[in-house]
Image (cartoon, grey):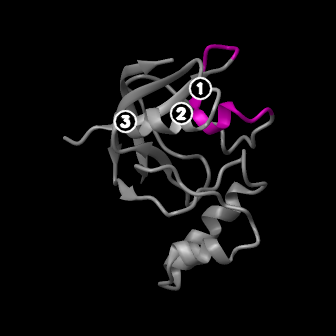
Amino acid sequence: MKKYYKICRRNDYNHLLSYNVSKVSQPNKEEVIEYNINEWVKPHMPNSKLFVFDSLNAAINCLSKNGNCRNYEVYECEVKRPTKAAKYRGDGWWSNNLQEYWNIIKKAKKNKKSINKALEKSKEHFPPMPAGTVWCDELKLTKLVYFN
């Protein structure tokens, strides 16, 4: 079985959250996903996906390129329905509207258009997706493999 990797960080209450959400002071409640070892998790936002990395190196490289990478944890995980991610990402840290990101993708798929071109034409700012990013419908953290 292919291994994937998820970056998480513990909040002040010791809850394990997604990397991008932990950097946002007031994230939208649909963006906050809490993870526990050996529990399957789905995204809360309609029509969205979860983000993982296809290698441990890709996850660590993402952390190192984003400056302050202290106290982050990388977990090996199992995923359901992995697919290659778009060229651009939407998250609460960079974009004011994560739901708009997923709406653009849904509309592009429905109209059989290029997702990347649809994101490029959007009025929102969607920065480049980190190398090695994969989308999935569900994930389960299986073990801690890296802590910084």
* Res 17 visible: yes
**Magenta extent:** 12-25
Task: Indicate the position of residue 128 as horizontal and vertical percent values.
Answer: 58, 57
Q: Is residue 21 magenta?
A: yes
* CA separation in Å, label 3 and label 1: 14 Å
Q: Label 1: which residue?
A: 69
Q: Label 3: which residue?
A: 57
Kind of residue at disc 3: Asn
Task: Work out whether mark 2 precedes mark 1 in sequence or the reverse, and give the earlier one.
Answer: 2
Count of labels shown? Answer: 3
Task: Work out whether mark 2 precedes mark 3 in sequence or the reverse, and give the earlier one.
Answer: 3
Task: Indicate the position of residue 83 as horizontal and vertical percent values.
Answer: 37, 58
- Relative horizontal placement of residue 95, taking residue 134 as reference (left or right): right
Q: Label 2: which residue?
A: 63
Q: Is residue 62 magenta?
A: no
* CA separation in Å, label 2 and label 3: 10 Å
